[in-house]
């Protein structure tokens, strides 16, 4: 039994994910806000600390906590290094502060407090031992507390802020309660929270139409991507592609000998997940791409797709990693009535699972060894959660810079669980959130709900798998706003090009897909082409880089506007230095106007403080004096404002 | 590391209170609904059980769980006995059911499934070992699955409900996941959830005005309480009352020798918490009251108030249980500027806390030994939570029938924590929830939020400490509705009389208190007096007893009505047999009408099913054919309907 003298109880510590089994996530330099409920019997003064440490540090650091309201307390600390932190909270009845609180109330009630002063001497004596600098002051107080002639001085100092601060800074924590869980936080490099992705197919980079692009060709595309302001390039799988049951153009099952197959049907007699498709080049070519990209400030992200073509070397080398049927065939992937004969799924229930897991870890480490620190993971929700938890932890032990983006477009709790087991970022439903209500509701769920501490969204307006209905029928203005919102709502975003910025595709009638998709064939792009859309993508990406309000996702406040076609949101960097107001016209065909209220209180301002609103796209600047301000947006001009708010 | 072959993960098991450190509460015969999130990779079929046991039973029982929606599963079991239950959940990929699910989809797609049939034989062979009764059927199926001539029979049976039921009832639970916490449930006797309290001061029962009532006088009051339909009588403290700093009438500090003092200033030279105030009588008189009450179906509840008058024997016998000041005095209770010189609070941080706790436990056991099984605990929020957790557990070890009502009118989280540490019931904010919005919001919080599993509300329209503003200015109609709502919203309710039913008091101007309060003086009541209010109290209490919908609190649905003065709610017993619709006119002065929609779907009915609405007060009965039905209530007739809904 705990001591009966312990009176504070602790509940509801946040962030706590599944009883502390999973870590809250932050990036280097962020604050971790901690809250908890503290309750005690009676009216004594409670005091509390966060205690935290980095890695296996032997001693704890402490950060103060303060009452927010209604028994809820809060505090924060900054996570300075990549890796594992641990925190918990402790709280105690603070006897010196309780004594001071009570004597203040009695003095205010004009009671004579000589007995109370004598009672306080014990707290002064304890404080002397801890607050060496204040020794003389405290000794003087002890004399005054005993001396009726110094009564006025004694009661003045008894109530003083100086004495309060001495007590507050030197708690004895007698009979303290420590929360019974130590909670984990995992700190990533900043890229985990702020990244700008561009996906293209390396095989579609050839100079001549009809040829298969190579890594050498990719070298010439890198400046194109750089110029648009992206800092991550994600390549679909670059490995040998299976020939058995190879798919033809548009997912047909009658390929011609020219057909190049689906990059996700990985492996053939030329190799598997640790090999490169010969048509793209060799390892030296690959390294050259990585090197030049890095020089341009771009990281190459690879696809990690755990599935095999029937020709993959694993099938012969590790037959137990696949599920064999009574007729001696392997069970190919299927979702009746759909069949994917070109893909053998991994049989994760294999008795040989331990060797298999370690082999898969070694794939990631193989590419990491070649300088790859970001992996976009294909369909992680079709592999066991426990496997991902193991793999990500093992990789992080070798290189804690490695980041994983989960490509799970599935049920919400499954996506959340993948984030909990370690994925650094996740694809989202943004692709299908179009109207104002949907966007606000979804952003609120992501940034205010429990997910805010562990799920880092990555917003994509399109992918090779998804040509969303709204874009299939949309004009250029819509492509402009869908990019801009992805880029300004979420600090991680990406797009699949050049089909996006060139709006160059045939819709696949009746499906949310691209016709003549690069998944099944090589395409040829004019990398020199430009247009208004590309110009605005470039400018918005540049603004994102320059304004730190865009380097965070959870720092968003939607502003009320009476027009359902106008979406307004205010973003502020964690240090409060960067303040941005975005207003978007969601209607790509019609001009809209409305009145917007900037949340001045977020900047510590009164409602009558004039603001200088600098439009970062047009360079126009406005002074807003009033609480409500007029905004008008013509989609055929620029369908949004991105204002830097200055005061 | 757990086996990598384990694929189901479990989260969000409910009810789980503070990670299972506190028990969910139920009463004998109730259902415990359990929910949990189960997720697995891919699309295989999940199956799951609740496992539970009573006390230290060596083996678990199992109850099935089913998918509700979006990865949330639910199931239930009935708690049949008083005491401790434990439950958890387990889930697994169900291979036979997955096989059946997949073969169904392939057959529907007109695929030839001979390989799949052969694959299924392994599941039939396993099922044979468990489902002995179906041995012949399953052996026949094995033959059919192998025999091309029986293909039609084979695919018919492969998809059959019979085979599904065999698989479902005989799971192998291979690679199952068991939730990593075993969660406690504490089951009380039914009175914990359904009780009807009446509080009166035994000293106010004398036949002659001016005399001090006795337990002998109380014997004659018992039939009065019984007739009104109450089943718990709660007495304020019956112990010797301190004389030092005794309070006079109306809380004055200048008592006359006649003043009887405050019953909560416990203890004097005649004894303490295990003694009886001599003016009330002796132990035999007390036992006579308990005996006669029990014969009438009434339990006597005592007040457990842990504080002492300066004359209490503890002060001399256990000085370390009190806080002594530097001048040699004991710190009396105070909340500056308020002073309670007649009360010494217990010093719970005493080094002798272990002996002290055990002495306090012994007080409860002393009265329990005299037949007392219900204690109303005075101000539990001014004593440590850990102390209550210990005391309640120790008492329950001796007599699990004992119930504790927490008199904590304080901050919400403190009240909730007291419920978590074991209080069977708690006072609530009902006393101050008056308008429709407040009542619905508060009831929703109590019955839909996390509290529903551990906090059992007890609704009181008044107490000796609280003469609420609304009642001070109210007419009889208001007293009628405040009683009726307490009695029908909450399955536990109580009132302090006879002041309530006789509406016989002078308000204490400017305070939510009674003038000439019985806390400070003896009053004389006419126990023969009757009025409309008392008659309706009696009838409503009788209806509560007869209709089991009122024996539960969480089973409430508020019905939409367009009139803000009309509150309508539907209640249904857990077995669905008892269905009640209440409609209350909250305006005690004016007639109101409106249209109400009975939630027929709760009774499994369509919206056009006619209902017989039997008004249990007036005996009138109506047939309601339509979805929306007219209701009109004149507060000067009966300000509410209580309909028994029949169909």
Image (cartoon, coloured by chain):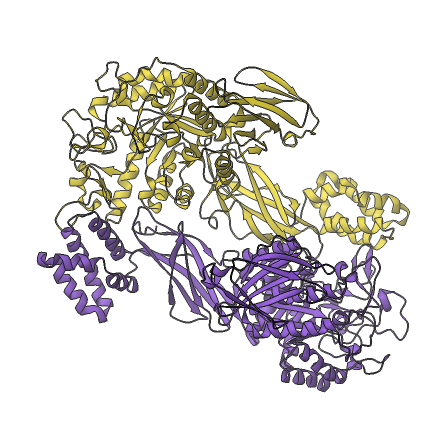
Chain colours: A purple, B yellow
Q: Quadrant of the N terminus of chain B?
A: bottom right
| In this picture, residue A440 sits left or right of residue A6 | right
Q: Quadrant of the C terminus of chain B?
A: top right
Work out whether residue B528 or residue A181 is closer to the camera in this orientation and state it: B528
Asked if A633 appears above or below A358 in the picture, the reply is above
Determine the image quadrant of residue B549.
top right
Asked if B505 appears above or below B242 in the picture, the reply is above
Work out whether residue B53 or residue B244 is closer to the camera in this orientation and state it: B244
Residue located 81% across and 66% down the image: A342
Asked if B400 appears above or below B583 in the picture, the reply is below
| In this picture, residue A293 sits left or right of residue A249 | left
Q: Could one spot residue B567 in this view of the protein?
A: yes
Where is residue B236 shown, x and y percent of the image? 30, 29
Asked if B311 appears above or below A231 in the picture, the reply is above
Where is residue A171 shown, x and y percent of the image? 29, 62
| Total marks placed | 0
Work out whether residue A602 or residue B501 is closer to the camera in this orientation and state it: A602
| In this picture, residue A420 sits left or right of residue B411 | right
Residue farthest top in this picture: B528
Determine the image quadrant of residue A323.
bottom right
Where is residue B279 shown, x and y percent of the image? 20, 22
Work out whether residue A575 or residue B572 is closer to the camera in this orientation and state it: A575
Residue located 30% across and 28% down the image: B514
Where is residue B573 shown, x and y percent of the image? 56, 29
Q: Could one spot residue A236 in this view of the protein?
A: no
| In this picture, residue B338 sits left or right of residue B67 | left
């Amino acid at each position: 039994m705990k001591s009966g003298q312990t009176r504070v109880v602790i509940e509801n510590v946040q962030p706590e994910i599944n009883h502390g089994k999973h870590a809250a996530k932050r990036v280097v330099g962020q604050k971790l806000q901690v809250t908890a409920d503290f309750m005690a019997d009676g009216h004594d003064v409670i005091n509390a600390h966060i205690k935290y440490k980095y890695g296996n540090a032997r001693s704890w650091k402490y950060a103060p906590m303060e009452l927010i309201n209604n028994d809820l307390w809060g505090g924060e600390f900054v996570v300075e290094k990549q890796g594992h932190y641990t925190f918990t909270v402790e709280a105690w009845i603070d006897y010196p502060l309780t004594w001071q609180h009570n004597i203040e109330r009695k003095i205010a009630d004009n009671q004579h407090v000589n007995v109370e002063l004598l009672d306080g001497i014990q707290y002064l004596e304890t404080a002397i031992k801890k607050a060496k600098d204040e020794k003389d002051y405290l000794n003087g107080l002890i004399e005054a507390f005993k001396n009726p002639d110094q009564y006025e001085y004694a009661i003045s100092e008894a109530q003083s802020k100086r004495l309060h601060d001495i007590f507050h800074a030197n708690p004895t924590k007698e009979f303290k309660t420590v929360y019974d869980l130590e909670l984990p936080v995992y700190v990533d490099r900043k890229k985990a929270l702020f990244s700008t992705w561009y996906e293209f197919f390396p095989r579609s980079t050839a100079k001549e139409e009809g040829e298969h692009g190579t890594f050498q060709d990719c070298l010439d595309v890198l400046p194109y991507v750089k110029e648009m302001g992206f800092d991550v390039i994600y390549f679909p799988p670059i490995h040998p592609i299976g020939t058995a049951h190879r798919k033809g153009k548009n997912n047909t099952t009658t390929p011609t000998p020219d057909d190049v197959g689906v990059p996700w049907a990985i492996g053939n007699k030329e190799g598997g997940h640790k090999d490169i498709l010969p048509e793209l080049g060799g390892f030296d070519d690959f390294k050259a791409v990585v090197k030049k990209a890095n020089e341009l400030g771009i990281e190459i992200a690879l696809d990690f797709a755990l599935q095999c073509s029937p020709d993959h070397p694993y099938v012969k080398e590790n037959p137990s990693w696949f599920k064999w049927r009574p007729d001696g065939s392997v069970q190919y992937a299927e979702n009746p009535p759909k069949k994917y004969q070109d893909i053998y799924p991994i049989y994760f229930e294999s008795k040989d699972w331990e060797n298999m897991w370690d082999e898969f870890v070694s794939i990631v480490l193989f590419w990491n060894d070649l300088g790859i620190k970001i992996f976009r993971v294909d369909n992680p929700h079709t592999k066991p959660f426990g496997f991902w938890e193991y793999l990500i932890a093992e990789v992080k032990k070798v290189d804690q810079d490695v980041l994983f983006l989960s490509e799970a477009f599935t049920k919400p709790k499954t996506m959340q669980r993948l984030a909990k087991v370690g994925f650094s970022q996740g694809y989202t439903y943004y692709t299908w959130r179009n109207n104002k209500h949907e966007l606000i509701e979804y952003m609120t769920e992501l940034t205010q709900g429990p997910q805010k501490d562990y799920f880092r969204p990555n917003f994509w307006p399109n992918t090779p798998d998804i040509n969303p209905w709204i874009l299939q029928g949309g004009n250029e203005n819509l492509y402009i706003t869908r990019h801009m919102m992805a880029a300004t709502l979420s600090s991680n975003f990406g797009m699949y090009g050049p089909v996006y910025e060139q709006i160059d595709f045939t819709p696949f009638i009746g499906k949310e897909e691209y016709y003549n998709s690069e998944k099944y064939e090589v395409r040829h792009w004019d990398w020199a082409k430009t247009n208004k859309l590309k110009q605005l993508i470039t400018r918005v990406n540049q603004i994102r880089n320059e304004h730190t309000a865009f380097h965070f996702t959870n720092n968003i406040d939607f502003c009320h506007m009476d027009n359902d076609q106008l979406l307004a949101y205010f973003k502020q960097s964690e240090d409060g230095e960067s303040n941005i107001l975005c207003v978007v016209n969601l209607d790509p065909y019609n001009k809209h106007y409305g009145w917007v209220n900037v949340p001045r209180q977020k900047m510590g301002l009164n409602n009558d403080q004039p603001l200088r609103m600098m439009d970062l796209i047009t360079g126009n600047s406005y002074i807003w004096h009033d609480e409500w301000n007029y905004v008008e947006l013509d989609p055929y001009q620029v369908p949004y404002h991105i204002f830097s708010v200055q005061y």
